[in-house]
Image: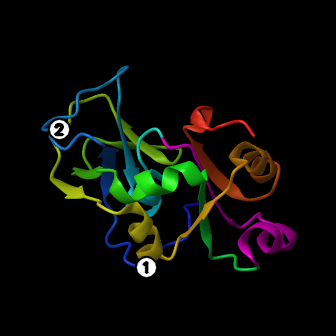
Amino acid sequence: MEPAPPYPGEGLRALWHVSDDAGIERFEPRNGRVWAIDTRHLPLYWFPRECPRATFWANSGTTDDDVVRFLGGDATRRVHIVEPRWLESMRTARVFAYRLPEEPFDAWDRFWITDSAVEPVDVVDLRDLVRLHEEAGIELRADDDLLSLWDEVVSSTLDYSGIRLRNAVHA
């Protein structure tokens, strides 16, 4: 699977686990696995835990029509969409990114997994999640009908990730 486009301030590649818990000293496997995400895909988790979001970007198979329709003609753009009711909590939520050691993780789709317990190497308080999007040049939009937009995105040629969509308000 192709990675999402890079973003300003991305930094070096690392593995991360994002949580609203500030005091995790050791990640124990849940259902047999510890999950991580790489730096390039870390922005998919710059949200309060339960916040439904649709995220998308172009890949090598994205048509010019979809780049124009969804990305304003810019194939390097990344777009994240939430419902308007989540914007305030994105400014105030406390979310923490735990940097994890690369060993013993193996790549799986966009994720990295291990069946071993893992101790974090570092923890970063992400603070204002709206500001993080701005600084990274990732377009953050609000849409009252997130699920209808999601249906359009998954029917397009874009690459995408949808998280916590079960929590979306049905328009």
Residue 118 appears at what percent x and percent y? 20, 37
Q: Measuring 39% from the left and 55% from the top, which residue is drawn there?
A: 38
Q: Is residue 46 visible?
A: no
Which residue, given by chain and number where applicable, does mark 1 sit on? 8
Horizontal side of residue 150 vs 165, given as left or right: right
Q: Does residue 106 sit above or below 16 in this rendering?
A: above
Q: Where is residue 89 in the image (x, y as percent from the top left)?
A: 41, 51
In the image, residue 170 above or below residue 5: above
Total tally of numbered discs in the picture: 2
Check the image and report above or below for 49 versus 38.
above
Camera-side residue of 130 and 55: 130
Q: Residue at x 59, y 54 (%)?
A: 84
Helix, strand or loop status at disc 2: loop
Q: Give the range drawn in magenta.
A: 51-72
Relative to 12, residue 167 above or below: above
Label 1 to label 2: alpha-carbon separation:
28 Å
- Mark positioned earlier in the residue sequence (1 or 2): 1
* Residue 138 in sight in this render: yes
Q: Name the residue under label 2.
A: 24
The amino acid at mark 2 is: Ile
Seen as rendered, the residue at the extreme right is: 65
What SS does tag 1 mark? loop
Q: Residue at position x 32%, y 42% from top? A: 105
Q: Measured from the top left, where is residue 167 in percent x and y?
A: 57, 34
Asked if residue 58 is among those painted magenta in the image, a careful observer would answer yes
